Amino acid sequence: MRKTVSIQNTKYTLLVQEEQDSQYRHSLNRLTKAAFGFTFEQWYQKGCWGKNCVGYSLLFQGEVVSHVTVSPIRFFVFGQEKQYTQLGTVTTAKEFRGRGLSRFLMEYVLADWAGQSDLIYLFANDSVLGFYPKFGFAPAREYQTLCPMPQAAQGVLPRKMDMQNPKDQQLLWQFAEKAVPQYQLAMVNNPQLVLLYACCFEPFSCAPWLYCLPKLNAIAVAEYTEETLLLYDILAPQPVSVNHVLSALVRPGISHCALQWVPLEPSGNGGAAFEVVPYTEEDSTLFLLGKDARLFREQPLRFPLLSHT
């Protein structure tokens, strides 16, 4: 969809979900590269950009000057399926800032998606913390889970995956597509976003953190840092014990784990007890809008890293 709109007496072209237009797409890529250091091109060429990623852009004289991406995502929250909507890549070209373009797009998007999801959310950097409350968004706290590493399992060796290998790419896609919820707030059936972080996101890649665990029929997304293992995700078509995954990932010198989510097994399921603590990330604040915002006020929750847009 495209139409002409007037903002502060200047005419712009509004485009919605026009990613197949290569001229528009390359212009958008120039904007996101300048603002965030990445482009959508490789992700598009892999066939991952579809209804799961809806772009709203304002063009001036054929160039994209302001943009918001809308990502409808299915989650399971405390065992219930939810439809959430994430906003991302909210940006305006430097020379067009202060003209109300981001405000126009935010108001347009919120009106377009009103009533279509249980929650609208986004992650904002520190420079725009005062912007989103103007539209009804409120900041929310997230949590992580700490625990000591268990004893190493016998015969359950992780295989580091190679994202240059098409077979491993296909395997990751299959596991992400069929993954069942492993924690309190879990994204389901969105291999496109997982592949974005594994293969197509220039500023940040989870490719070095992917481990196949054949004996557990699972893929773990895990980063080793000094004495601590950061476990970002478990992708498996069946429930998997967190402690079994941790036992498979044990390395010398790694004594603690920080689960980047809140598990379904609050007691540790026979292993060491889990400690749920607040999580903060530098220059990133979660903002929420909608009826399910109360869940984040009442319960410790965390959006998995590979669901961010």
Image: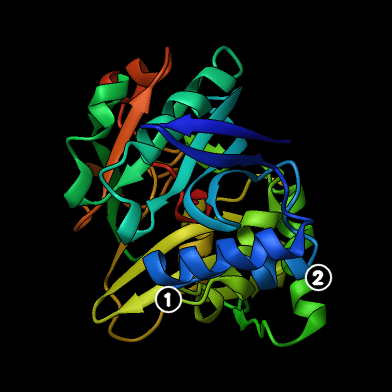
Checking the image for residue 250, the label placed there is 1
Residue 216 visible within the image: no
The image's colour scheme reads rainbow
Up-down: is 290 above or below 36?
above
Q: Residues within 10 Å of mark 1 (few under 14, many from 20)?
A: many
Q: Amino acid at mark 1?
A: Val
Q: Position of residue 158 (x, y in %)?
A: 59, 79
What residue is rendered at 72% in x and 71% in y? 214
> Which residue sits at x=42%, y=76%?
250
- In the image, taking residue 272 as reference, residue 185 lies left or right, namely right
Q: Which of the two residues, 240 or 3, is positioned nearer the viewer here? A: 3
Q: Secondary structure at mark 1?
A: loop
Q: Nearer the viewer, residue 85 or 177?
A: 85
Residue 305 in percent (x, y) is at 45, 54
Residue 214 lies left or right of residue 29; in this view the side is right
- Mark 2 or 1: the one toward you: 2
